């Protein structure tokens, strides 16, 4: 891996850890509990040796003598010998009158050490889990907030399934990595350090032999970790592919059924799950290799230690049997945190892969940015002007709008017609700043929309689109979405204006009926009328109807048109219509082709003077 790659990975992991800052007090408590666990765990294993020697010594006095005969200088002069210090303190506390008394007190102390060890471990796990889950909650909420505040262009570049995968799978992977790495990063290095100090105090020669192969182990673990990072990235990409297929299939299930494409979609899903299966098997195979490989290397170390240390004991002048037993017990215990450190590196690599995908979303800049000194504009007084407006969805991409000049007076009813892709929807989407023109300006009452507060700007505009978006909530809450505090009487009045009141009254709980995900319990026409009622309740001075009546039957469309005519008295209306019958009474009709205004006028004027409009009109009304 290049130096640049290492720096990027370190930066990503440090950024993940930065989410721990709000919980520094809890982390200090975790560190203290970890230290308590290490002390109790070390002491519990250290006490195994005196228990064994108590059984095998003929007299307790001989045991004490054996202890005294053990070499006191196994470390350089002036260095504190932790092993000898522990022996001195333990045998000061434990009565040495006879073996039964010694054994009894050893058992009491061992039980106490295990009790405190497990108490510290429980409290440590409790608080680390609390911190981990809070971090995951904070991160998931930050990603969600970032996503919903992104501009519409962001959602053109990122598929819904990809975003869902990031909010669920990637952050879950970060949770797993945090769960496994925080405790390991805190506890295991401390435990290894204390164990090595005691081992060194017992016999620096054997300890030196044991640690000589650690660099080899570290290199192997590093290679496994790098491979795991690559494989983890592939696994998350495959999960995102599965989520995308699942989301698209369920959302478009009616089309799937209509074209009898169940087998095709099933095969496509099976292909994606097969790719995910192969990726995750490779990942798990590599991940599981780290632990047995470390353990095998550890077994080799221990075998050499037993042979060499046993030789020193048998020689009888360098190492006592009690210290050798103690050395073996602690060396065996050392294998667990060493193996755990190997898993820590693997988990860090997994977290870096998931973190990169998550931070890519968090770092995506918004293109629609409100100015710091944005102008407050609570009302609309005169008119809207498009001044030489040009737009494309991507830099140096196809020009969608080219040099649009248009003036709309207050309370005018403006309609846009043209072939698909002519730029009608894009033109009206520039008004609420769903996108920004790369050239020219859109102005309301002489103010550039880029200078107006986004909340005030969008508060002036109500929108009803062809693709109706409703939520899994009650009818009343869907109509009053984003407008809390309205009475049921007011909601019923706007529903009557939108020709929705009658079918709502026939529902099981009327306005308190849940309408299902995306309003699936309603027909297409009913969903659209709910959406229109929502726009009417908002009562904005500017209304945008983007083919809002395209899914309504003729009777409903007639009634909606009546409601729109009533609203026209005090509102400016932009209408994009597929059916020309719904816009023939507009004050002005704009004909768009290839991103340009080719004609404008009333219905009568355009039938006389516009070949393109006359062609569209005859195509609909003569069939």
Image (tube, grey):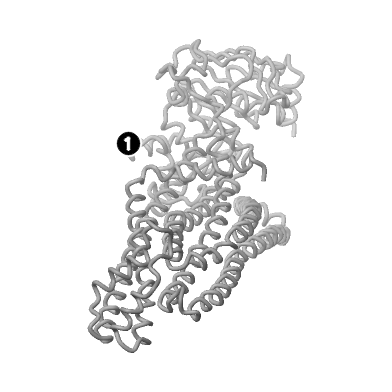
Q: Nearer the viewer, residue 225 or 108?
A: 108
Badge 1: how crowded within 10 Å, few (<14), some, or many (20+)? Answer: few
- Tag 1 residue: 485
Q: Nearer the viewer, residue 48 or 521?
A: 48
Residue 613 to residue 152: above or below = above
Quarter of the image for residue 413 reads top right
Residue 411 to residue 341: above or below = above
- The image shows residue 556 at horizontal and vertical percentages of 54, 38
Q: Residue at x 49, y 72 (%)?
A: 332
| Total residue callouts | 1
- The image shows residue 285 at horizontal and vertical percentages of 64, 65
Q: Is residue 254 visible?
A: no
- The image shows residue 358 at horizontal and vertical percentages of 55, 44
Q: Residue at x 26, y 77 (%)?
A: 108
Could you tell whether 53 is left or right of 447 in the image? left
Could you tell whether 435 is left or right of 381 in the image? right
Residue 508 to residue 616: above or below = below
- The image shows residue 22 at horizontal and vertical percentages of 37, 43
State the SS at label 1.
Answer: loop
Q: Is residue 98 visible?
A: yes
Q: Residue at x 34, y 83 (%)?
A: 54
């Amino acid at each position: 891996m290049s130096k640049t790659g290492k720096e990027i990975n370190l930066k990503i992991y440090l950024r993940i850890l930065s989410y721990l800052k709000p919980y520094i007090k809890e982390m200090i408590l975790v560190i203290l509990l970890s230290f308590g666990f290490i002390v109790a765990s070390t002491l519990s294993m250290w006490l195994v040796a005196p228990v064994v020697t108590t059984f095998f010594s003929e007299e307790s006095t001989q045991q004490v003598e054996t202890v005294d005969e053990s070499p006191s200088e196994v470390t350089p002069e002036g260095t504190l010998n932790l092993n000898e210090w522990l022996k001195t303190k333990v045998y000061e506390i434990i009565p040495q009158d006879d073996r039964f008394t010694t054994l009894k007190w050893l058992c009491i102390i061992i039980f106490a050490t295990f009790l405190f060890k497990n108490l510290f471990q429980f409290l440590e796990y409790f608080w680390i889990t609390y911190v981990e889950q809070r971090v995951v909650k904070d991160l998931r909420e930050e990603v969600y907030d970032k996503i919903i505040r992104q501009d519409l262009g962001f959602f053109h570049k990122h598929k819904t399934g990809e975003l869902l995968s990031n909010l669920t799978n990637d952050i879950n992977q970060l949770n797993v990595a945090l769960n496994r790495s925080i405790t390991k990063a805190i506890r295991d290095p401390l435990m290894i350090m204390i164990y090595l100090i005691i081992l060194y105090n017992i016999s620096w020669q054997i300890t030196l032999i044991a640690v000589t192969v650690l660099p080899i182990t570290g290199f192997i673990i590093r290679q496994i970790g790098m491979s795991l990072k690559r494989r983890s990235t592939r696994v998350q990409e495959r999960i995102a592919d599965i989520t995308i297929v699942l989301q698209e299939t369920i959302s478009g299930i009616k089309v799937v059924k209509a074209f009898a494409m169940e087998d095709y979609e099933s095969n496509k899903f099976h292909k994606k799950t097969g790719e995910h299966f192969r990726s995750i098997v490779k990942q798990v195979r590599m991940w599981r290799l780290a632990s047995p490989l470390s353990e095998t290397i550890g077994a080799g170390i221990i075998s050499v230690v037993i042979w060499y240390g046993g030789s020193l004991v048998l020689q009888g002048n360098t190492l006592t049997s009690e210290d050798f037993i103690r050395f073996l017990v602690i060396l065996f215990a050392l294998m667990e945190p060493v193996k755990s450190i190997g898993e820590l590196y693997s988990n860090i690599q997994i977290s870096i892969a998931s973190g990169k995908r998550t931070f890519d979303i968090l770092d995506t800049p918004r293109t629609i940015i409100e100015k710091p000194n944005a102008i407050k504009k609570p009302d609309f007084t005169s008119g809207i002007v498009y001044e030489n407006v040009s737009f494309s969805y991507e830099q140096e991409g196809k020009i969608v709008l080219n040099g649009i000049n248009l003036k709309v007076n207050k309370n005018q009813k403006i309609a846009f017609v043209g072939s698909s892709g002519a730029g009608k929807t894009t033109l009206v989407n520039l008004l609420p700043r769903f996108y920004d023109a790369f050239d020219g300006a859109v102005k309301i009452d002489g103010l550039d929309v880029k200078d107006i507060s986004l909340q005030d700007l969008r508060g002036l505009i109500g929108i009803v689109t062809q693709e109706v978006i409703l939520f899994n909530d009650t009818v009343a809450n869907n109509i009053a979405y984003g407008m809390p505090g309205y009475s049921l009487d007011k909601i019923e009045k706007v529903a009557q204006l939108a020709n929705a009141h009658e079918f709502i009254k026939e529902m099981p709980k009327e306005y308190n009926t849940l309408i299902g995900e995306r309003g699936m319990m309603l027909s297409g026409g009913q969903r659209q009328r709910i959406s229109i009622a929502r726009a009417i309740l908002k009562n904005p001075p500017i209304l945008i109807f983007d083919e809002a009546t395209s899914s309504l039957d003729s009777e409903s469309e007639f009634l909606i048109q009546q409601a729109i005519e009533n609203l026209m008295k005090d509102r400016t209306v932009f209408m994009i219509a597929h059916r020309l019958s719904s816009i023939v009474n507009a004050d002005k009709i704009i004909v768009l082709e290839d991103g340009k205004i080719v004609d404008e006028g009333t219905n009568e004027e355009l039938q006389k003077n516009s070949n393109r409009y006359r062609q569209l009109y005859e195509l609909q009304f003569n069939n």
